[in-house]
Amino acid sequence: MGCGASIYAVGKRKKKTNIPEVVVYVPSMRIPAQSDLQRPLRGLIPHDLVDRLGCLRNQIVLVAEDTGGSAVAELRRALEEYLPLLIGLTKKEHGLEDLVEFKWKNLEDGRLENSVANSWFELLSVIHMLAMLHLSEANSLMIPKDHSGSGIRVVSSDCKRDSVDLLLKASGCLVFCVHEIMAHLPPDIKKKFSRDFQDGALEAISIQALGQGTEIQLGLAVESQKASLSVKRRLACEQLIYFGQAYHFLSESGMSHMHGKKHLCFIKWKFLEAKAAAYYYHGLILDKGTEPACHVTAVCCFLAADGLLSESKKACFTFCLTAPVTRSPPLWGAMKHLTQKIP
């Protein structure tokens, strides 16, 4: 739904409203629903293997339902144990691909989304869930926390680096889904998928994860005295390209429903921030030139960055108010630096 696990209570009334804070956008998560593995597989594979498959899948169902998907480490362990056994069902020579009807539902509203008798669909869904868990964990790590009790919330450099690793893993999972698994699914099955589970939407989330990883790297570069202006400009330009591509893929997927609309708002916000940073660092590099025209062009870059920064703040506001309502974190990284320097 575009929110992570870290939430902060707002208001002093007895019935508190919890508005999640979003640094890394996490699309709606799917979780497995109860499915009968025993009957269709009985007698075809060893009994203990059938039991193990069913036990692990039921464990994933129960943990996901009981915790709302917040028990990331436990869910990931169970999914990673389940994967090697599941891959065995996809082997054509075993003839087990279409025997089990696998059911998956939306975590947020419990609505059954797909019920498909195809083990490649189950593999796609499991790896997609792993990607969403990586994004969720990255968001949780990037939520600033007040460890000292001083009222100042910060994110450590280690958390930022761990988040970059998680974003790369999430992107890799989604690339694998699109390029390695989708090809094994018949067109009639793929047509039944919702728009946010189609190739274009999965590509968009994969590229967005790379963009957010680059955004964090730029933030680390801003904090480092060793990082040159050209490195910062390159990272800002890479971030801009990633978010531009993600917006294109998502908009082409026809994602205009509630969560799709919010997702597009998020990417637009991040695109404008990246563009402002790219102009700003390009201006700083130009300003080091000796020709009078260099300074004039640099000033134009700074003015453009200032305008884009104002637009990005409006885009952030729009994102936060688009249902489901969320909050943005305190300014951090390159945006904190630009907000202080550009004026």
Image (cartoon, rainbow, N blue to C red):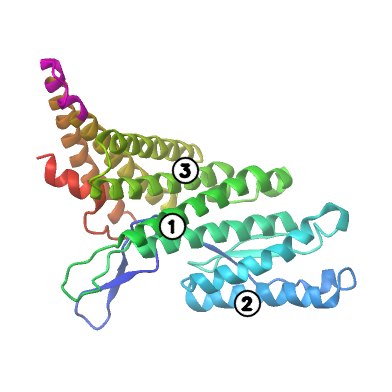
- Does the magenta portion include 288? yes
The image's mark for residue 144 is: none
| SS of the residue under disc 3 | helix
- Name the quarter where the N terminus is drawn: bottom left
Q: Is 198 positioned to the left or the right of 68 in the image? A: right
Q: Which residues are magenta?
A: 285-295
The residue located at (43%, 64%) in the rendering is 137
Q: Alpha carbon of mark 2 to alpha carbon of mark 1: how far?
A: 23 Å
Q: Is 217 positioned to the left or the right of 64 in the image? A: left
Q: Which residue is mark 1?
A: 26
Give the vertical position of 51 relative to 339 (above or below).
below
Q: Main secondary structure of the magenta part?
A: helix
**Percent position (x, y) of residue 145?**
27, 69
Residue that protrudes farthest toward the front in the picture = 226
**Percent position (x, y) of residue 199?**
58, 43
The residue located at (48%, 76%) in the rendering is 67
The image's mark for residue 59 is: 2
- Does the magenta portion include 89? no
Q: Which residue is mark 3?
A: 207
Q: Alpha carbon of mark 3 to alpha carbon of mark 1: how far?
A: 13 Å
Q: Amino acid at mark 1?
A: Val
Residue 296, by quadrant, is top left
